[in-house]
């Protein structure tokens, strides 16, 4: 495998982690404002 390909895969992984981290932080900030959102999300998770 070429080094450029591994670099692209590594950057994609890093970008994905950053996006997940930001979305998780954003969800946590919203959850603190609206406690009802936590309940609905946990109920959806249990239903799945």
Image (cartoon, rainbow, N blue to C red):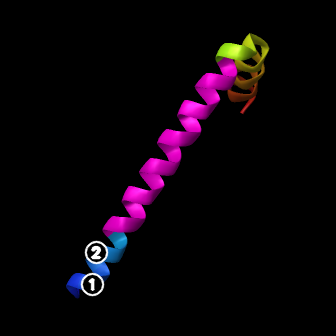
Residue under the point 39% across and 60% down: 13
Whether 14 is among the magenta residues is yes
- Residue at mark 2: 7
Quadrant containing the C terminus in the rendered view: top right
Hey, which quadrant is residue 40 in on the image? top right
List the residue tagged with mark 1.
4
Q: Which of 25 and 9 is in front in this view?
A: 25
- Vertically, is 5 above or below 30? below
Q: In this view, does 36 lie to the left or right of 30?
A: right
**Chain part drawn in magenta:** 10-31
> Within the magenta stretch, is there residue 25?
yes
Measuring from the top left, give residue 37's x and y in whole percent. 76, 20
Image quadrant in which you'd find residue 29 = top right
**Residue 9 appears at what percent x and percent y?**
35, 71
Q: How crowded is mark 1: few (under 14 residues within 10 Å), some or many (20 or more)?
A: few
Residue 33 sits above or below residue 7 on the image? above
Percent x, y of residue 35: 73, 11
Q: Residue at x 71, y 15 (%)?
A: 33
Helix or strand or loop: what does disc 1 sit on?
helix
SS assignment at label 2: helix
User: Badge 2: how crowded within 10 Å, few (<14), some, or many (20+)?
Assistant: few
């Amino acid at each position: 495998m070429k080094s450029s390909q591994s670099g692209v895969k590594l950057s994609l992984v890093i970008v994905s982690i950053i996006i997940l981290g930001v979305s998780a932080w954003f969800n946590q900030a919203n959850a603190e404002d609206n406690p009802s959102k936590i309940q609905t999300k946990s109920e959806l998770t249990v239903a799945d």
